Amino acid sequence: MTQHQTQPQSRPRPTSPALIALSWLTVALPLAWGVWETLVKVAQLFQ
């Protein structure tokens, strides 16, 4: 029989808070712009 070699558990590296913030901004800014443009167009409909 062969022995199983156990490898030490490697822990994932923590993600940089700056990278998380940049990722959120990459999604949130275009989304906010789209919502704003939609609200402006809706306001024009009801004038």
Image (cartoon, helix red, strand yellow):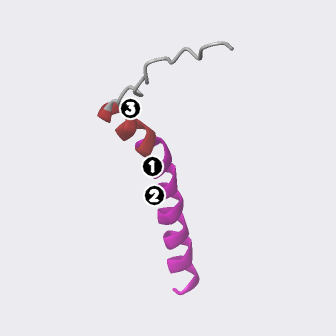
- Given contact means CB atoms under 8 Å apart, are the residues at marks 2 and 1 in contact? yes
Point 38% across, 38% down: residue: 20
Please tell me which residue lies in front, 35 or 13: 13
* Residue assigned mark 1: 29
Q: How many marks?
A: 3
Q: CA distance from mark 3 to mark 2?
A: 20 Å
Amino acid type, label 3: Leu
> Which quarter of the image is occupied by the N terminus?
top right
Q: Is residue 17 above or below residue 13?
A: below
Residue range highlighted in magenta: 25-47
Residue 32 numbered tag: 2
Q: Nearer the viewer, mark 1 or mark 3?
A: 3
Q: Nearer the viewer, mark 3 or mark 2?
A: 3
Q: Is residue 18 above or below residue 36?
A: above
Q: Is residue 34 above or below residue 45?
A: above
> Is 43 inside the magenta-drawn segment?
yes
Amino acid type, label 1: Leu
Amino acid type, label 2: Ala
x and y percent of residue 28 in the render? 45, 51
- Given contact means CB atoms under 8 Å apart, are the residues at marks 3 and 2 in contact? no
